[in-house]
Amino acid sequence: MTDATTLANTQSTPDGADAVQQIEALGDTMARIRQGVAQVIFGQEEVVEQTLVTVLAGGHALLVGVPGLAKTRLVETLGTVLGLDNKRIQCTPDLMPSDIIGSEVLEESETGRRSFRFIEGPVFAQLLMADEINRASPRTQSALLQAMQENEVSVGGHTHMLPRPFHVLATQNPLEQEGTYPLPEAQLDRFLLQVTVGYPDLAAERSMLIATTGTDAVKLKPELDGAKLMAAQLLLRQIPVGESIVDAVLDIVRSGRPAETTISEVTRHVAWGPGPRASQALLMAARARAVLDGRLSPSIDDVLALAHPVLRHRMALNFAARAEGVSLDSVIDLLCAKYR
């Protein structure tokens, strides 16, 4: 079977009609993936889209929503249709870094020679679900941060590379705050998108009720695998982007910084704004959304659709804004207002 490197090399320099064919084929594949996921996850089209955007763009996602909204089922389903090895971590306050990344054990051979052997933890997966990530201690969160940032872990002075591709889909419950540890800003910034998971509408909940209380089980088949996904992620980086889209991304992101903005509400209400990584995330996510919709280049609509999930975890309101009942979403709406 062709490995990821070979696939990446064969698609490293697409041009002309060949590039168009590859992008269109990728769009068709992603459409089949969305259809497959829709058979299992009901009424969460925007959540599914944003999660697929994250994976296609090569990033990590933070899913925020109350319990019972199929966040875990979504990750399991994506692992199946994307053909990725997926694992799950249930985060608790007593979870140790070694429970995630693994540890070294001392073994003795038949000849009496002793040596250490590294036993891999669940982080050695292509798609990792960190359930209720804010319940893990800061020490454990920092271990996961290294994996997300560098695609490797260090144990006993030795570095171990993680599988490729490597994506973390973490969940967070916004209701229960007792016994939780807020995620550090550095770790929040490592998530490409923060996806808000809401309740399904009446029709979707009716369909879910009928489908999940019967005897029929939906069996999905893989549409991709790790090597093909990495080739798709490389292809995504070669999609052309117009200067007007680049300018809009920069304008929206930079307008969210109190020291650089011309929007008075931002100056009054924002404690700190998004950094350069937000611009990178917004542009890559816009490219991925265009491919999901079967288009060859992103539009301003893609940028506006993804501004909230890209920026909401990269900005913070000050005390005055919270006292006045100002929300981050309303501030982001102001950043995007001139492009609507």
Image (spheres, grey):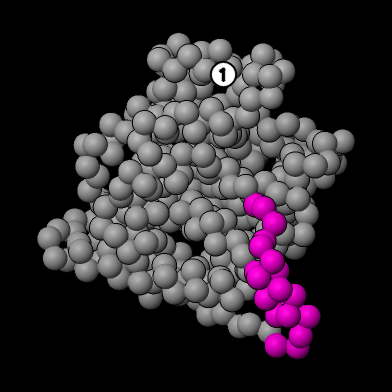
276 or 210: nearer the viewer: 210
Q: Is residue 204 magenta?
A: yes
Say whether residue 291 is left or right of residue 35.
left
Q: Position of residue 71 (x, y in %)?
A: 68, 58
233 or 96: nearer the viewer: 233
Q: In this picture, is 214 found above or below 279?
A: below
Q: Position of residue 73 (x, y in %)?
A: 68, 65
Q: Position of residue 87 (x, y in %)?
A: 66, 61
Q: In this picture, is 32 found above or below 339?
A: below
Residue 210 in view of the camera: yes
Q: Is residue 21 magenta?
A: no
At 72% from the left and 59% from the top, the residue drawn is 69
Residue at the farthest left position: 16
At 51% from the left and 53% from the top, the residue drawn is 50
Say whether residue 257 is left or right of residue 303.
right
Q: Position of residue 194 (x, y in %)?
A: 58, 43
> What is the quadrant of residue 284 in the picture?
top left
In the rendered structure, which segment of residues is drawn in magenta? 197-216
